[in-house]
Amino acid sequence: MDDLAQAVIEHLQVHDQESPFVAITTLRNGHTNVCNHVLVTPVTKNGTTSFNVQTASWVLYRHELTSDGGKITRDWVPKDVCNFATAAHVARYLLLTANQNDRGLDKRSVRLSIGPFGTKLFNDLGMDLSSQEDISGLLDMIGSMRPTVKL
């Protein structure tokens, strides 16, 4: 029985990985010219998908993102926030963060850009989502997204 359990765990660990696709929202505070990015990365470990959340902030007009082949090479220094077990919890966190960032303006929506991490993602207009269900549905979807298949 122990051999069977070990074989199952080893099989599940074969698929341990971060998703090649992420979600990012950019929250700007006009009063302080601070730009806050929240990055959500689906990760699978032992067959269970969860969501890592990182943030990075900088003052607008004083920093720039540079790239080398689409990879960000400067000024992206994220801080690990936490890992959420469900997309619904991430959605709630994003809505609360967006509302807090707007200092009481009650934004009630999050603009999410989806794709491989790189400078193009920061320039994408994204989708404006206002319900926890819409946000969590999109996050669940990126957990199952894969690169296109070439024939």
Image (tube, helix red, strand yellow):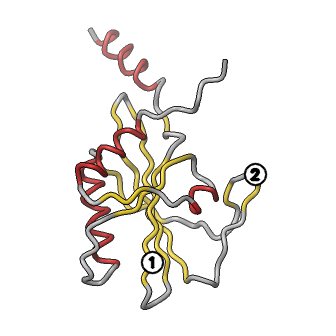
Rendering coords of residue 93 (x, y %)? 28, 61
Q: Work out how far the residue at label 1 is from the one at label 2, CA to CA, in angstroms.
A: 27 Å
Rendering coords of residue 90 (x, y %)? 30, 54
Q: Is residue 11 above or below residue 146?
A: above
- Residue drawn at (54%, 78%), measured in percent from left and top? 58
Q: Quadrant of the C terminus?
A: top right
Task: Give the quarter of the image for residue 66.
Answer: bottom right
Element type where label 1 sits in the image: strand
Q: Label 1 belongs to which residue?
A: 28
Element type where label 2 sits in the image: loop
- Residue drawn at (48%, 23%), measured in percent from left and top? 14
Q: Amino acid at mark 1?
A: Arg
| Neighbourhood count class around disc 1 (C-alpha, 10 Å): few under 14, some 14–19, many 20 upward | some
Rendering coords of residue 21 (x, y %)? 51, 43
The answer to whether residue 29 is left or right of residue 66 is left
Task: Give the quarter of the image for residue 45.
Answer: top left
Rendering coords of residue 83 (x, y %)? 35, 52
Q: Label 2 belongs to which residue?
A: 69
Q: Amino acid at mark 2?
A: Gly
| Neighbourhood count class around disc 2 (C-alpha, 10 Å): few under 14, some 14–19, many 20 upward | few
Q: Is residue 57 above or below residue 81?
A: below
The answer to whether residue 20 is left or right of residue 62 is left
Q: Quadrant of the N terminus?
A: top left
Number of on-image labels: 2
